[in-house]
Image: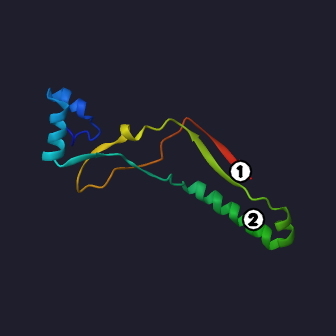
Amino acid sequence: MILNDRKLKLNEIADTLEILTEHVHHIIHEYLGMRKLCAKWVPRELTFDQKQRRVDGSEKYFNMIKRNKPEFLRRYVTMDETWLHHFTPKSNRQLSAWTAHDEPAPKRRKTQQSTGKVMASVF
């Protein structure tokens, strides 16, 4: 059952097999040598277009510095921007999975499609 669905909960297995949850816990840990680990967050990976926009913006500012450095430094305001995605992520407990002792912890990327996003600019 666990190999088919590593996100099964102890009580779901116990209900299916009609045995006590403590017995399921003992079998999984002692006989199968498995443990339940939460997924680790991996930072969101940028798309090619997002990377290209950053390169284009950097080149634009570099060219402005080359044209008139004193004027650029007098007027330049430092700014950073980021996308804020609004979605409800699943909790670590919901995403935990059974793994054998020699297996690494599961990983998940923040690549879920959001219901919307807004640009936050910080000056």
Q: Amino acid at mark 1?
A: Val
- Would you name the residue on which mark 1 appears? 122
Residue depicted at 67% across the width and 46% down the height: 120
Between residue 72 and residue 12, name the one nearer to us.
12
Quarter of the image with the N terminus is: top left
**SS assignment at label 2:** helix
State which tag comes first along the sequence, 1 or 2.
2
Residue depicted at 86% across the width and 71% down the height: 70
Between residue 6 and residue 20, name the one nearer to us.
20
Q: Is residue 106 left or right of residue 24?
A: right
**Badge number at residue 86:** none
- Would you name the residue on which mark 2 appears? 61
Q: Position of residue 62 (x, y in %)?
A: 74, 69
- The part of the image, by quadrant, that contains residue 36 is top left
- The part of the image, by quadrant, that contains residue 85 is top right
Q: Is residue 91 left or right of residue 36?
A: right
Question: Which mark is in front, 1 or 2?
Answer: 1
As measured in the structure, the alpha-carbon distance from the residue carrying label 1 to the one carrying label 2 is: 17 Å
From the viewer's perspective, is residue 51 above or below residue 73? above
From the viewer's perspective, is residue 14 above or below residue 69? above
Q: Amino acid at mark 2?
A: Tyr
Disc 2 packing (10 Å; few <14; some 14–19; many ≥20): few
Q: Are marks 1 and 2 in contact (CB under 8 Å)?
A: no
Disc 1 packing (10 Å; few <14; some 14–19; many ≥20): few
Q: Position of residue 7 (x, y in %)?
A: 29, 39
**SS assignment at label 1:** strand
